[in-house]
């Protein structure tokens, strides 16, 4: 007969408590160590604990941290979870009275959310570092390919010529905005929950700002209820992560289409190509598929975190804790693989200039500039010029001709029919107008593909990249200072008699 009088029930132990213990041990052991020390320093500095008591607890914490390797621990059910294991070890070394005093003016609630924020900040920092590497790779490649012609597509069809650098610049701008969203999410994570206790703070004269500073947070989170109930630090982080990989997935899909045999706009080098086991002629750019499905996995895992938070009560709850946190961390792991691979992959790509030229010629995608030139040079309305250009394109495509070499005669006929006059545009001028180089060069407007406009844009992206690096260094410097302050303050406790 099952004994329901003793905690924990074996099934509950195996299905819930043991996995939670393992997650805390693997993801948060260092966070527990830092929180215990920072909270103890604050209790001593505010006089909530006498110096001698604080020193005794400090020495016991050192023993725990040097004698117990978290990675070697296995859950037995003797204590509820990793927190209570640490507390049991502390009481074993100091006695229950002194050992129990470390928990003065704090709760599992504020501890947990502080732990989760510490872990999430570290993962966002890792993601942002990977993003900075990708951003640098995209900018470098954009500069290298600033004048390399490609076909730009709309609705899956050839539309207009542009340059590979101009295309990558569009992706760069989205990445910059995604990185800014991640930075904003990190700023929310950078508000410390310690001192909120269970819900309403405490009657003890705690110094919340001191604990936040010792733990490397920017500041304490103001409202104590918000500290334990507002999970927007979670939803904001995973929403930003989801958008990052949703957007990168679109870029990756273009690379898949552009590297196909039929389009062949880009060439993937052998280092990123796998062969078929049966078809020796095949060159499979398999890394693109891996990036695509890993990006989709990351989007799905990030979306899962938002779904878990949906329709939960506005209070402290297990839904946002332990196992949900561990599950969400997998999104950062898969996302890092995409970012690192894409940063290596993009610079390796080469544009197939001959194929691009053929596709431009066959698709008549410079015809828009013919219409524009008729407006500028012949004084026609754009609608009339558009009709002449459209008739020219139809005739060229029907004849299987090149626009540059076979388009002049159809153009003259279309112009005469539409206007009742002969065009003054010479064959040489016509070929210049419909050339992709001219098409790009005249689009020297803010945000356009012409060399001057694109160079200005790329310079602005480099400046943005430098700002990202500066902000990351500022955070790293602040957190290193906090770690040094915590180490020094805790060492001072150890020296107390």
Image (tube, rainbow, N blue to C red):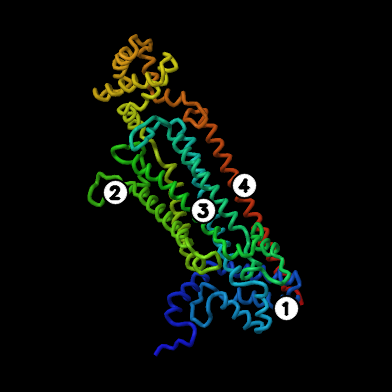
Of labels 4 and 2, earlier in sequence is 2
Disc 2 marks which residue?
Answer: 275
Using the image, determine if residue 421 lies above or below residue 69. above
Numbered mark located on residue 239 in the image: none
Of labels 3 and 4, earlier in sequence is 3
Quadrant occupied by the N terminus? bottom left
Distance from Cα at disc 4 to Cα at disc 2: 43 Å
From the top left corner, tell me how far across and down residue 267 is, in percent: 36, 39
From the top left corner, tell me how far across and down residue 206 is, in percent: 71, 68
Disc 4 marks which residue?
Answer: 470
Disc 3 marks which residue?
Answer: 127
Of labels 3 and 1, earlier in sequence is 1
Quadrant in the picture for residue 362: top left
Locate residue 373 relative to residue 55 in the image: left or right: left
Of labels 2 and 1, earlier in sequence is 1
Q: Nearer the viewer, residue 108 or 486?
A: 108
Distance from Cα at disc 2 to Cα at disc 1: 68 Å
Of labels 3 and 2, earlier in sequence is 3
Of labels 1 and 4, earlier in sequence is 1
Residue 61 showing in the rendered view: yes
Distance from Cα at disc 3 to Cα at disc 4: 16 Å
Distance from Cα at disc 3 to Cα at disc 2: 32 Å
Distance from Cα at disc 1 to Cα at disc 4: 42 Å
Q: Residues within 10 Å of mark 3 (few under 14, many from 20)?
A: many
From the top left corner, tell me how far across and down residue 22 is, in percent: 49, 72
Disc 1 marks which residue?
Answer: 53
Quadrant occupied by the C terminus? bottom right
């Amino acid at each position: 007969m099952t004994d329901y009088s003793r905690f924990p029930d074996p099934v509950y132990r195996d299905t819930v408590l043991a996995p939670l213990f393992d997650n805390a041990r693997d993801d948060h052991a260092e966070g527990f160590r830092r929180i215990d020390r920072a909270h103890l320093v604050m209790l001593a500095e505010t006089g909530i604990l006498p110096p001698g008591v604080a020193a005794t607890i400090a020495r016991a914490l050192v023993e725990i941290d040097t004698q117990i390797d978290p990675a070697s621990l296995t859950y037995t059910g003797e204590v509820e979870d990793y927190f209570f294991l640490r507390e049991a070890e502390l009481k074993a070394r100091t006695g229950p009275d002194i050992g129990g005093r470390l928990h003065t003016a704090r709760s599992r609630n504020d501890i947990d959310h502080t732990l989760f924020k510490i872990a999430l900040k570290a993962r966002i920092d890792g993601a942002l570092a990977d993003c900075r590497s990708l951003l640098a790779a995209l900018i470098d490649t954009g500069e290298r390919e600033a004048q390399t012609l490609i076909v730009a597509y709309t609705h899956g069809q050839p539309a207009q010529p542009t340059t590979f650098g101009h295309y990558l610049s569009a992706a760069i701008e989205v990445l910059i905005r995604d990185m800014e969203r991640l930075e904003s999410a990190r700023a929310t994570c950078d508000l410390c929950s310690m001192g909120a206790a269970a819900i309403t703070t405490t009657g003890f004269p705690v110094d919340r700002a001191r604990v936040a500073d010792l733990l490397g947070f920017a500041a304490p989170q103001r409202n104590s209820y918000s500290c334990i109930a507002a999970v927007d630090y979670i939803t904001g982080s995973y929403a930003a992560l989801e958008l990052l990989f949703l957007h990168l997935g679109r870029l990756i899909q273009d690379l898949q289409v552009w590297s196909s045999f039929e389009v062949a706009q880009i060439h993937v080098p052998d280092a990123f190509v796998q062969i078929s086991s049966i078809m020796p002629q095949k060159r499979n750019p398999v890394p693109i598929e891996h990036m695509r499905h890993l990006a989709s996995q990351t989007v799905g895992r990030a979306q899962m975190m938002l779904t878990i938070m949906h329709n939960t009560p506005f209070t402290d709850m297990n839904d946002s804790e332990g196992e949900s946190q561990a599950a969400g961390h997998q999104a950062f792991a898969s996302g890092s693989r995409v970012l690192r691979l894409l940063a290596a992959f993009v610079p390796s790509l080469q544009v197939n200039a001959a194929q691009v030229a053929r596709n431009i010629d066959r698709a008549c995608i410079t015809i828009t500039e013919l219409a524009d030139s008729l407006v500028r040079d012949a004084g026609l309305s754009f609608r009339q010029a558009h009709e002449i250009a459209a008739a020219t394109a139809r005739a060229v495509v029907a004849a299987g001709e090149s626009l540059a070499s076979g388009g002049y005669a159809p153009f003259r006929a279309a112009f005469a029919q539409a206007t009742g006059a002969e065009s003054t545009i010479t064959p040489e001028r016509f070929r210049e107008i419909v050339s992709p180089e001219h098409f790009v060069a005249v689009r020297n407007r803010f945000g356009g593909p012409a060399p001057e406009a694109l160079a200005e844009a790329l310079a602005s992206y480099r400046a943005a990249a430098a700002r990202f690096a500066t902000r990351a260094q500022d955070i790293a410097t602040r957190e290193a200072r906090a770690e040094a302050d915590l180490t020094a303050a805790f060492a001072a406790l150890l020296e107390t008699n």
